[in-house]
Amino acid sequence: MSDSDSDLDFDVVVIGAGNAGLTAATTLQRAGVRTLLVERHSVPGGCATSFRRGRYEFEVALHQLSGLGTEGQAFSLRPLLTSLGVAEHLEFVEERDLYRAVVPGVYDVTLPADWAGAIDVLEAEFPGNRSRIERFFDLVRNVTFWQVAAMDGLPAEQVDPLLFRQGLRPFKDVLDDHFDDERLKSVLGAYWGYLGLPPSRLPFQDLALVLFAYLEFKPWHIRGGSQMLSRALLDSFLRAGGEVRFHTAAAAIRTRGGRVAGVRLDTGERVSAAEVVSNVSLPATYAMLEGLPAPAAVARDLGTRRPGISGFVLHMGLDATPAELGFTASTNFVNVDMDDDRTFAAMRGLEPVRGIVASSYDVEPIGFAPPGASHVSLMTLQYADAWQALPPAEYALAKFAYAEGLLDLLETVTPGVRDAIEEVDVATPLTMERYLGHPGGAFYGYEQDAADGWPFRGIRRESHVPGLHLAGSWVGMGGFQPTLQSGAAVAGRLLESKGAYA
C-alpha cells in the first residue's frame, strides 16, 4: 500500500519490540513481508532485557523459560525458535529443579523438574500421599491437554467435559479435593507468584498449564540472559531485510475509510502500511487510533477489565558463590506462612513483604557474574496504587525500606547475605510503569482471573478495526512463552489472510 502523503511505505508496522513484537516482526519479514519495527527504548526486548551495574549484568525479568523442551520434543517452544532462525545462535541452560519452596519452621522442599522425581520427593516429605499426588498430576496433564486443544480451536463438543468441570474451578478447591495436608498444598501452589493471583482465585487450568510446562518441558534459562534471545530475534529480522527504529514511538495509528492506513511516528514521519501489529497495552493501542473511535464492543470490553499486578524487584551483585550463600536451587519461593490470601492482600499496600521469589542465576550459571560472585534477584508482586499515592519526597525512603523487608525474608534461608552485597538496584511498580509504558506497571497485562480468561474473553488477536492486530500479554496470558508464541500466532494469521505475502 502506498500513500502519497506518507514519508515511508511498508506492508506492516509492528509497534513495540517486546517478545510478541519481535516474533511477529521476524515471522513476517522472513516470509517476505516488508516490515517496520518501532521501539521507543534503545534496545529490543521490553521485559526481556538486562542491564549492567559495576562488574555484574542483571537479568530484568526472566526467572525460568517454560515450554522450551528438548530437541524433537513436540508442542514445545523450541520449534518456533528454530523456525525463526534463532535457536542455533543461543545456548540454553537447563535447570534441574522446579523450585525450592520454604516457609521457615514449617517446610523446606526442593522439587526436581521431573514428574516421577517430584512425586518421590513429595511422598518423602509428606508420607502417605503418593496415590493422591499421582491422581493430581494426572488431572494436571489431562486438563492441560484439553485446554491447549480448545485454545487451538477444537470445537467445544469434541473437548472432554473434564476441562469444563475442573478448569475454571479455583486451584485451591482442586487441591482441597485431593489433599488434607496444608503444607503439601502450599508447596504445589508455589507457582502462583508467576501468575499474579492466589490459589483461591486462580483458575485451576492456568496453574495446571504452568506446572505442566515446567515438569514436561523443563525450566530453562539462556546463556547471557533474555537479552540474548531478544538480540537473536532482532538479528534474524534484520538479516531478512527488516527495518527497525529505536528511540522511536508510534504517536498515532492512522486510519482511512474505517481501516488502518499506517502510523505516525513521534519524529513526525508518516508511515503507510495496510496492517499494524501492536505489542503495547490495549488502552494505549486504542488511544492511538487517529480519526476513528474505538469500536463500541471494544469500549464496553475494556471498561470491564482491570490491569493486573506489577512487582517490586531487588537486583543484587553478591561477592560470594551460590554455595557460600546457601543457594542450592535456582528458583526459591520463600513465604512467611501458608496464608496466600493474606499475602496477596498485602500486595496492595506497603506493609512488610510476606513472600518473595529469589532467583539465583549462578546455581546453573548463565554468565552474568564474575568468578567467585553471583547475581540474585528478589521479586515480590505488588500493585502500583500504594506507590502512586506516595508523595515524591517519601518515595525513595519507602523504596529502600521495602527493599530491606525483602532482604529480611531472604535472610531466613540465607543468613548473612547482606554482608556479600556489592551492587544493588531497586525497581518498584512505578519503575515498571515508566519502563514498559503499561498502566500500573502491569507486566501480566490484565488481571489473570477466570472472568478475564480465554473461555469468556477469547484470545483477542484481532481488534475489530480492519488492519489492526493485537499481540502480547494484554490479549492472553503473560510470561515469556505465551508472549513469544502470541506474536508468531498473530503473524501467522496475517500471512494466511494475505496469501499474496507468502
Image (cartoon, rainbow, N blue to C red):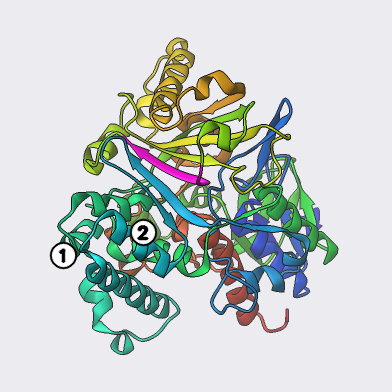
Q: Which residue is mark 2?
A: 121
- Of the residues shown, which amino acid type is indicated by label 1? Asp
Q: Position of residue 290 (x, y in %)?
A: 57, 51
Residue displayed at 72% across by 66% down: 87
218 left or right of 412 in image? right
Q: Quick one: 429 or 81, which is closer to the camera? A: 81
Q: Position of residue 79 (x, y in %)?
A: 64, 74
- Of the residues shown, which amino acid type is indicated by label 2? Val
Q: Position of residue 359 (x, y in %)?
A: 52, 41
**What is the secondary structure assignment of the residue under circle 1?**
helix
Quadrant location of residue 439?
top left
Q: Quick one: 387 or 399, which is closer to the camera? A: 399
Judge whether residue 3 can be spotted in this image.
no
Residue displayed at 45% across by 13% down: 397
Quarter that holds the N terminus:
bottom right
Q: Is residue 42 above or below residue 394?
A: below
Quarter that holds the C terminus:
bottom right
Residue stretch in magenta: 328-335
82 left or right of 491 in image? right
N-term-proximal mark, 1 vs 2:
2
Of badges 1 and 2, the one in the foreground is 2
**What is the secondary structure assignment of the residue under circle 2?**
helix
